[in-house]
Each structure stands twice: as C-alpha cells, then as structure tokens.
Image (tube, coloured by chain):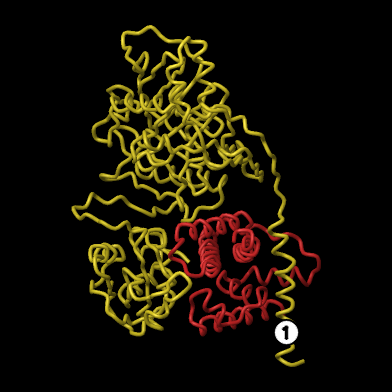
Chain colours: A red, B yellow
C-alpha cells in the first residue's frame, strides 16, 4: 500500500502545503496513523487521502499564522503562462487549493471530493466556485 | 467565447500548472550523503574495556544489545542552519530508567569510546546529563560495591565498573543564581519538583546494568550560523556579552551570556534529536505565580519543536518581562533552524493553572470534539476549532441549525468533567448531555467518513458557539480564548 499510494499522496500534500518537507512529514504521519488505527479503518485508501488533505490544510493554516515567515518561493516554471497560473493557485486559501487539486488535477467528481473530505457536497461546490472565481480574477 | 469554453481553458491551465509545478516542488534540490554506520554494540566496547581491566562482568549483560540506529544521514542545508537529521536512536532502554517527567530523550554525542545522552523535563527546564565511557580505570575509593567505585559530584554521581566503564549522571538547569546560598544543585531544591541525588545514583546504576550504549554512531545535529544568534539576541540580551560558545556534543550547543565576566547570567542551549518529538512546539510556560520553572533566584524552560530540536534558556533575570522576551528569543531561534512556529511567536499560549482537585480520567488529546457555529458571526467555529486542535481530537467545524445567545457544551456519557473544563476554557458555557439528534447541519450523518463508519457515538463533546463567545472572539481573536492563541 505504501508503494502504491505514497507518491500520489506526496504530490497532493505538496500541492496544498507548497512545501516538500512538510509534505513528506504529513504523508509519513498519515501512514503511521493508519498503522495505529489498523483494524478500525474500513477503507485505508480513503483514510489516507483524507488524513493527508486535512493535515495539509491545517499545516498550511498554521504556517500562515506566522506571517513573517513567507511560504518558500515556488520553483521556476517552464513558461510565463504556467508561472502565472501557478502563482494564482498558490495564492488560494489551502482549502480552496485542496478542492481545486482534487477536482482538476486528480479528476475527482464533486461527490467523490465530498466523500473524501467529509464535507457536504454543497460545501465542495461553493468552495470550488469561490476558488474558480478567484482564479479567473487573478488570471484576467 | 462561451462561459463553458472559458472554464475549460481555466481548468486546462490549472491542470497543466499542477502537472508541472508539483513534481518540481517535490524535486527541489537537497543533498543526500550516505554514511556507513560506525555503530557497534556496547558489548564490543565492553569486551575491549574488560580486557584492559581484566574483568568481563558486564559483557554478558550486553548480549541483549540490538536495534542500532539507522545507517544513513540526510544533510539539509539552507541559509539559516546546517541540519543533519538521523533517525532517532532507540532510547527505549533509557526511557525505562529516567523519571517519566523527563519525557524527551536524545543522544547528543557519540564517539568510539564515549557517548552522551540527555533527558529533559520540558516545563521546568531541568535536564539529566548521562555519560557512558569505555576504557576507564577502576578508581580506588571508599564507596565501592558490586557495581563499582562510586563518587559523588556537585550535581550527581559517577560510577566506574570493574569492566572499565565509567558512567556519570548529573542534573542541572543551566545557570546558577548569583546569590544562591546552598549547594549548586537546583535540581534538589525542595520547592521545585526536586530530583534527589539518591535517585540519580539509582538511575546511573541502572544505566550501567542495562549494558547499553551507542558508541560511534551518527548523531543528529543543528548548527545555526553565528548571525542567527546575534540577530536574535539583539535587543533581548543587550548589556550581556557572549562569553561562551561551546559544543557539548554533536547535537548539543551552549551559548553563555554574562553582564559580568566569568559567570553566565543567561545560558542558551540547543539540543537536536529529542524523542519523542512533540506534535507541535511545546507551549510557553509563564514564569509567574506558582508556575513551575522558577527557582530561588533563577528560571529555566525548554521550548521543543516537532523537529526534535529543543532550546533551553536559563537565566538569573527572573522578571516576567525578561522571561517573556527570552521565550520569544527561544522561539526565534527555533524558527531559524526548524521553520516557523505553529503558534504566534511571543504570545503566551498556555498558562499553567494551579493543580486542580478534579481528576481528569480522559486525556484531552483523545477527546473527540466538534465546534458548531450557532451565532451570527461567521468563521468563529473554525477559529475555535483551530485553537483547540492541539488539545482535542477535533472534527471539521460546522454550522448549527439554530442560533443561540449563550454557548452550550454538550457531553457524551462520561465526559461531563471534560465538558466543564472546556466550558471554562472558552470563557463560559452551559453544560448539557448530548442530545440524540444534535442541532448541527446534516445531523450526525454529516460526520460519516472513511474513518467514521457509525457516526452515533462519534463525538465526546459538541460546542454550540453562541453569540456570547462569538462576539468576544470577533472583538479580539487573540484573547477570546484566554489560554490559547486563536488564529486563522
């Protein structure tokens, strides 16, 4: 299971936290949590995904609290368009970025995202709507 | 161009950005240097020592040695610090020897014939220093028993075994007060959660009996450049001069400052590799009132980061304002070497309350809590949830289906005391048993998820945040919860 899911989860955590080391830590913690909860978790894959996303969102929130410590600058992009788009993605609040990543990067449906995050589908829709509005404004 | 086309274009751009940039994030440069383990079991060292000493009493005991530290290191370098991270050594054998309140352990140096360990008590600044060295000669002394030759030191004990192993233990807080009249061992002060010397003797005897040491293995280290210290100390330690910059071990550095030469007023120590690392930076302990950490004429505290790096500051300047500035300094230093704090720097996050008569049978970290917004102020349930996330097993904040003036804490069976405690913590609330159908959006079913199959019984506490608490939080998010920083 570790080999199968590690890289995908690592990418998801990095997409939300924007920090490789934080992402590695979060994914490791999630697998350890699964190990501790073994026997009580019916769907380990869903558990891992939810744990990684929630931890990533919370981690990113906490980092933002310390405003004097900016998020590390993103690596250079291959084109101005990608760079501009990524800057807009990075500026999204972590929850919105998480939903955008799941919807457009992981190609998940609204219902699947809702189930993964444990949110009502309406909350997913409204979060995604706000994120897209913001992206559109930033990329206008 | 239609709206759908615009959205498709945006989605494609976003997808392309994730596709390209996330792998780049994950591939950000780092250097890795495999380092073969030089670990060898205590047994081997003891056999050498025993040959020298002509005895092999302890060599037999060391046959149980196992679980060596991992054999590689990862070195990460940035502008702030050079950090060598190694997997935590297996210190479970030491865990069973030192008192439980010395909750964090580290191996701070390891040479082919000498290893040092530290056990720290995070909240009152004490530390136990343990040294095990091979190749010692048996000393002639009056205090000799089956273990070896014992000698009392100013802050502890040493014992040299017939096998040629010398083990020492001491307890300290870092500095000594200028006017302290008694023996220079703050750990023995009756008013400060003392560690009697007799216990230290027992402990080091058990260390020897355990027959364990980790000679010549990689040790975690963090070395912040001098500028980090001078920048952080500026304005905090004005009037004091850096008189000592000492490596006590690979993962153990001490900087001493003094207003007068010769004796430090303030001592700052950084230890790397503390285990088990806390899941968030250990909170600020206010050095006031009956809070622990105050000695007769000195104060000491540790701040420990989830990275396993801890900073101890001990000082003879015990004015609360000075101590608060020193806490900020500790936080800044940890920020510099381990990344930013999980709490607002410089803001007291936790006060130590007087010991309560109430016995709490459930550890707060295991209590499952949901905060629902039943007020007219948006966002407050999330704020309160975030402020409580380190102490409770919190669920994602939600909205209540009702609006109320006075906040309510609902409790499941057996959690009434916890509810009372939480109600006081948030500034006051009514306490009521958990209803079968709590007034939260989506009901209990909204809690269902991959890790919650049966939402009935999935909550121990439910806070309905009414207008009373919400308006306070809106007015001042930093003080709405009196003992915890509210953020986000």
Few, some or many residues within 10 Å of mark 1 (<14, 14–19, 20+)? few
Is residue B379 at all visible to an observer of this figure? yes
Q: Is residue B185 left or right of residue B268?
A: left
**B477 and B339: which one is in front?**
B339
Q: Quadrant location of the N terminus of chain B?
A: bottom right
Q: Residue at 39% of width from left, 18% of height from top?
A: B159
Q: Residue at 35% of width from left, 80% of height from top?
A: B374
* A120, above or below A90, in the image: below
On the image, the x and y values in percent for residue B111 come to 57, 25
**B255 and B179: which one is in front?**
B255
Q: Is residue B114 left or right of residue B348?
A: right
On the image, the x and y values in percent for residue B426 come to 31, 66
Spot the residue most to the bottom: B2
Q: In this figure, which residue is indicated by the disc labeled 1?
A: B8
* B133, above or below B381, in the image: above
In this rendering, the count of numbered labels is 1
């Amino acid at each position: 299971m570790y080999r199968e899911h590690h890289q995908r989860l690592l990418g998801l955590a990095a997409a939300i936290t924007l920090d490789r080391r934080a992402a590695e830590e979060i994914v490791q913690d999630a697998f350890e949590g699964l190990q501790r909860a073994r026997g009580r978790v019916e769907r380990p894959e869903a558990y891992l995904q939810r744990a990684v996303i929630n931890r990533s969102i919370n981690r990113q929130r906490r980092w933002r609290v310390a405003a004097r410590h900016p998020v590390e600058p993103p690596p250079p992009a291959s084109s101005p368009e990608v760079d501009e788009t990524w800057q807009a993605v990075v500026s999204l609040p972590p929850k919105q970025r998480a939903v955008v990543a799941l919807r457009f990067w992981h190609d998940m449906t609204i219902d699947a995202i809702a189930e993964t995050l444990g949110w009502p589908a309406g909350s997913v829709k409204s979060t995604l709507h706000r994120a897209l509005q913001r992206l559109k404004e930033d990329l206008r | 161009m239609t709206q759908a086309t615009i959205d498709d274009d945006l989605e494609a751009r976003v997808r392309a950005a994730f596709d390209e940039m996330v792998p780049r994030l994950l591939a950000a440069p780092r250097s890795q240097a495999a380092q073969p383990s030089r670990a060898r079991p205590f047994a081997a060292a003891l056999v050498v020592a025993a040959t020298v000493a002509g005895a092999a009493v302890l060599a037999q005991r060391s046959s149980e040695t196992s679980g060596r530290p991992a054999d590689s290191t990862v070195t990460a370098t940035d502008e702030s610090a050079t950090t060598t991270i190694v997997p935590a050594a297996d210190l479970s054998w030491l865990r069973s020897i030192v008192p439980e309140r010395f909750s964090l352990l580290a191996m701070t140096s390891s040479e082919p014939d000498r290893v040092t360990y530290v056990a720290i008590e995070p909240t009152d600044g004490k530390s136990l220093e343990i040294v095990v060295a091979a190749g010692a000669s048996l000393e002639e002394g009056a205090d000799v028993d089956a273990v070896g030759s014992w000698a009392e030191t100013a802050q502890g004990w040493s014992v040299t075994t017939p096998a040629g192993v010398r083990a020492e233990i001491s307890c300290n807080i870092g500095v000594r007060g200028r006017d302290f009249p008694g023996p220079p061992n703050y750990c023995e002060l009756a008013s400060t959660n003392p560690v009697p010397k007799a216990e230290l003797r027992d402990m080091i005897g058990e260390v020897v009996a355990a027959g364990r040491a980790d000679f010549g293995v990689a040790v975690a280290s963090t070395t912040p450049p001098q500028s980090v210290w001078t920048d952080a100390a500026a304005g905090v330690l004005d009037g004091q001069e850096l008189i000592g910059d000492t490596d006590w071990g690979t993962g153990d550095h001490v900087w001493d400052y003094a207003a007068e030469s010769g004796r430090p007023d303030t001592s700052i120590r950084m230890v790397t590799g503390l285990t088990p690392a806390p899941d968030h930076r250990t909170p600020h302990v206010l050095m006031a009132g009956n809070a622990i950490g105050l000695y007769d004429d000195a104060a000491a505290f540790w701040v420990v980061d989830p990275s396993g790096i801890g900073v101890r500051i001990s000082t003879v300047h015990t004015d609360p304002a000075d101590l608060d500035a020193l806490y900020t300094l500790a936080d800044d230093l940890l920020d510099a070497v381990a990344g930013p704090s999980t709490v607002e720097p410089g803001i007291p996050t936790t006060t130590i309350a007087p010991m309560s008569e109430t016995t709490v049978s459930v550890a707060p970290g295991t209590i499952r809590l949901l905060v629902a917004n039943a007020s007219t102020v948006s966002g407050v349930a999330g704020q309160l949830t975030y402020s409580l996330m380190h102490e409770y097993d919190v669920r994602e904040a939600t909205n209540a289906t009702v609006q109320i003036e006075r906040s309510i804490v609902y409790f499941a069976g057996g959690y009434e005391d916890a509810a009372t405690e939480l109600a006081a913590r948030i500034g006051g609330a009514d306490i009521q048993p958990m209803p079968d159908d709590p007034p939260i959006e989506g009901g209990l079913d909204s809690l269902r998820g991959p890790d919650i199959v049966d939402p009935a019984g999935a909550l121990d506490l439910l806070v309905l945040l009414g207008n009373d608490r919400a308006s306070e939080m809106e007015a001042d998010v930093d003080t709405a919860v009196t003992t915890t920083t509210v953020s986000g």
